[in-house]
Image (cartoon, helix red, strand yellow):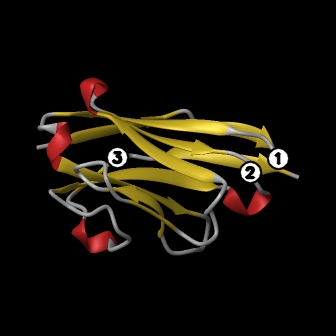
């Protein structure tokens, strides 16, 4: 059983930056693809970014390409989402998720484990 804990959310002005962290425990972190998803009020949970278990492949939603970067540090059992040039429409609860030997792509159903989420609010 893998446990995931997100941190790093908060309130930031438009144009600012935040770095989210996802600390994993209870499994072999390097065997899991990691994904970041987000859910705004009244909207479906959507894919933001993913990184394969090998770290060789990354995927991004079109809405965040060029602004967000996903990475992982297997020595620290942690995945990161660096978010730059934030916009008010990025406001949401951000969740990390883990998929055993996954590719890190956008298929939400492929991810077996989920964190509780961290709130990101971008003011205009």
Across and down, in percent, residue 62 comes to: 59, 72
Pick the residue in front: 27 or 101. Answer: 101
Locate residue 25 relative to residue 35 in the image: left or right.
Answer: left
Where disc 1 sits, the SS reads: loop
Q: Is label 1 in contact with label 2 (beta carbons under 8 Å)? A: yes
Across and down, in percent, residue 12 comes to: 76, 39
Q: Residues within 10 Å of mark 1 (few under 14, many from 20)?
A: some
Q: Residues within 10 Å of mark 2 (few under 14, many from 20)?
A: many
Distance between the Cα atoms at labels 3 and 1?
26 Å
Locate residue 81 relative to residue 71 in the image: left or right.
Answer: right
Pick the residue in front: 84 or 9. Answer: 84
Across and down, in percent, residue 11 comes to: 73, 38
Q: Is residue 24 above or below residue 45?
A: above
Name the residue carrying label 3: 115
Using the rendered image of the protein, determine whether residue 34 is visible from the camera's viewpoint.
yes
Q: Is label 3 in contact with label 1 (beta carbons under 8 Å)? A: no
Q: Is residue 83 above or below residue 23?
A: below
| For marks 3 and 2 on the same chain, the one whose residue lies earlier in the sequence | 2
Name the residue carrying label 1: 15
Label placed on residue 86 = 2
Label placed on residue 60 = none
Q: Residue at x 77, y 56 (%)?
A: 87
Across and down, in percent, residue 68 comes to: 60, 52
Q: Residue at x 73, y 63 (%)?
A: 89
């Amino acid at each position: 059983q893998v446990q995931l804990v997100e941190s790093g959310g908060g309130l930031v002005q438009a144009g600012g930056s935040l770095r989210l962290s996802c600390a994993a425990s209870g499994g072999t972190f390097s065997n899991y693809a990691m994904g970041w998803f987000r859910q705004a009020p009244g909207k479906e949970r959507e894919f933001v970014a993913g990184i394969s278990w090998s770290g060789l492949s990354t995927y991004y939603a079109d809405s965040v390409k060029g602004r967000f970067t996903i990475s992982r540090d297997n020595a620290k059992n942690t995945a990161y989402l660096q978010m730059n040039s934030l916009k008010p429409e990025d406001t949401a609860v951000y969740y990390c998720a883990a998929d055993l030997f996954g590719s890190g792509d956008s298929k939400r159903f492929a991810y077996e484990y989920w964190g509780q989420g961290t709130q990101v609010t971008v003011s205009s």
